[in-house]
Amino acid sequence: MDKIGSQANDALTSPAAQRNREPIAEVLRQVLPETGRVLEIASGSGEHALHFAAGFPTLEWLPSDASPEARRSIAAWRRTAGLGNLAEPLALDVTSDWPVEAPLAAIVCINMLHISPWSASEALFAGAGRTLGEGAPLIVYGPFRKQGQHTAASNARFDADLRARDASWGIRDLEAVDALAETAGLVREADYSMPANNACLVWRRRAC
Ligand SMILES: C[S@@+](CC[C@H](N)C(=O)[O-])C[C@H]1O[C@@H](n2cnc3c(N)ncnc32)[C@H](O)[C@@H]1O
């Protein structure tokens, strides 16, 4: 993420978020409920949160991130936007306690699973199982391997680069992620192909 504005301004900008926010919003239009609280995990710069809170004014958008720098950026963008349905960023590390009240109407997580250890993927699905309301969706965006293969040569190169930066990172196998979902009581409903060889996956929390 790049810094924009003056040194006093904590707002960060991510060129990828600028590019993918509208394709992701198109999926969200088909998946999100009309009302309720949507928790965004790993909001990063906060540009997605701003775009989605503006685009879905009847939802309450709860951005969050484990990183203080990201939370400062989200708060800086939030101050400029004046959106009544965009909450203050939550300090939420998926592997610790989640400071949110259940039931949530939806959870959105963009580009975290491959840039965090596998324990973060496990924690995301376990937390979704604990906090989503019955039938509520978990929407996860990013690159995935499918049936043991990368979906593009560029993803294979990206995966090697990630693993060189941190051996615990890497593009996840969709089948392994589906197994986490199953254990958490979530059922996969959709797999949208997205630009730049990414996918947007939707699971829903089963009725108890
Ligand atoms: C590649 S950035 C993606 C940010 C944003 N979602 C986007 O697409 O622009 C990955 C984000 O995941 C966050 N993250 C990594 N591990 C996390 C964890 N255990 N819990 C919550 N957030 C985490 C990082 O702080 C970072 O903001």
Image: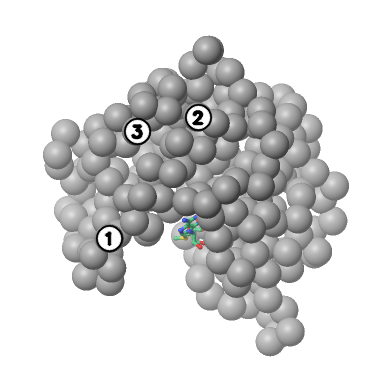
Residue on which the image places disc 2:
129
Measuring 58% from the left and 18% from the top, which residue is drawn there? 134
Instruction: Choose between 19 and 173: the one closer to the eye.
Output: 173
**Which mark is first along the chain, 2 or 3?**
2
Indicate the secondary structure of the residue bearing disc 3: helix
Residue on which the image places disc 3:
180
Instruction: Choose between 33 and 63: the one closer to the eye.
Output: 63
| Residue type highlighted by circle 1 | Ser
| Cα–Cα gap, marks 3 and 2 | 10 Å
| Residue type highlighted by circle 3 | Leu
| Residue type highlighted by circle 2 | Gly
Mark 1 within 8 Å of ligand 1, using the beta carbon: no
Q: Which mark is residue 168?
A: 1
- The answer to whether residue 21 is seen in the rendering is no
Quarter of the image for residue 114 reads bottom left
Left of 201 or right of it: where is 18? right
Measuring 78% from the left and 32% from the top, which residue is drawn there? 58
Mark 2 and mark 1 in contact (Cβ < 8 Å)? no
**Which mark is first along the chain, 1 or 3?**
1
* Spot occupied by residue 135 in the image (x, y as percentages of width and height): 56, 18
* Spot occupied by residue 187 in the image (x, y as percentages of width and height): 41, 21
**Which mark is first along the chain, 2 or 1?**
2
Indicate the secondary structure of the residue bearing disc 2: helix
* Spot occupied by residue 54 in the image (x, y as percentages of width and height): 74, 45
The vertical placement of 190 against 142, above or below, is above
